[in-house]
Image: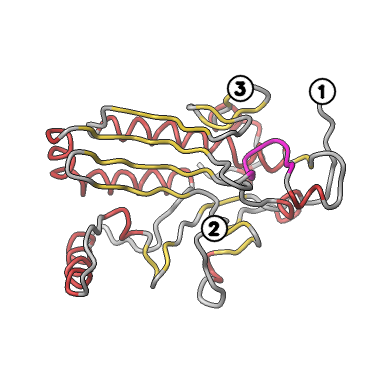
Amino acid sequence: MKKYEKVRNSSEYWIDFEAELSTYYHYKWLGKRSVNAFNISELDFIKKYVLLTYKYGFVTPINYSEENLLMEFENYKLKNESNGIFGSNLMFYIYKYGNDLVYSSKLFTDLSDKEYKIVVQINPITELKDIGITSIGYGSIPLRIEMIKKTEEIEVVCYLDNDIFNLWIDNKKTKCEFEKPVDNSELAYLNTPRLNSFLRDLKKLCFDFGANDFEFENLGLQDFSENGVLFDGEVIYYEDIVEILEPHQKIV
């Protein structure tokens, strides 16, 4: 059994996976009939998707108005096309912030805080409230979801590129200080079951709207499965632990 290094705050060691290590969840609509049917119901899909992000606190949009979404998106699309930019879609639009894409998620980053933070980057930890005063890059995003649209295929892709949801952390930060991996279990138990429930419900939503294929892609990582992040070989969902959480630790 592995022994882990206990530290005061394991989020200080969160980082993107090194090299090409990552995990992807692909939800697909294959074939013209499926694509055409989705395009007709895309607005309804986005609205229900947004409700799902609000429920679990992951990848919540920063650019969303239910009443004016379609009109604002069309204006945005026309502006892009006048500048020679094509291929805009609703999911891209709701995360657009200036020239960046911003994905905010509610994460517990410090047990002593007694509350979550709305985080847009993990290395260093950057909160949504600070994006106007700090630069936002494309890396170190807690969780990222994109929609890729082609003539005969639509794909919603969920990217897990970091170690924040694992029970233990073993990366270049930890190796600089410790011989053993760092114990991340206390924060993981507050964040990861909620993530697993979100991934489960996202898959269901996609298939409810006509998705006909799913692919789990794991590029060399441990403790990941098609159903979410594993705790000692098991997928734990938010409903499994919510009754034992303190009131301030409950998001759903």
Residue 20 position in % (x across, y down): 56, 44
Q: Please give left or right for residue 150 compared with residue 238 in the image.
A: left
Residue 184 position in % (x across, y down): 73, 41
Residue 168 falls within the magenta-colored stretch: yes
**Farthest front residue in view:** 19
- 179 and 100: which is toward the camera: 179
Q: Residues within 10 Å of mark 2 (few under 14, many from 20)?
A: some
| Residue at the (74%, 42%) spot, across then down | 170
Q: Report the Cα–Cα distance between label 2 and label 1.
A: 32 Å
Give the amino acid type for the residue marked by disc 3 in the picture.
Glu
* Front of the two marks 3 and 2: 2
Q: Residues within 10 Å of mark 3 (few under 14, many from 20)?
A: few
191 to 118, vertically: above or below = above
Which span is picked out in magenta? 163-170
Indicate the secondary structure of the residue bearing disc 1: loop
**What coloring was used for the rendering?**
secondary structure
**Farthest bottom residue in view:** 133
> Residue 234: which numbered mark, if any?
3
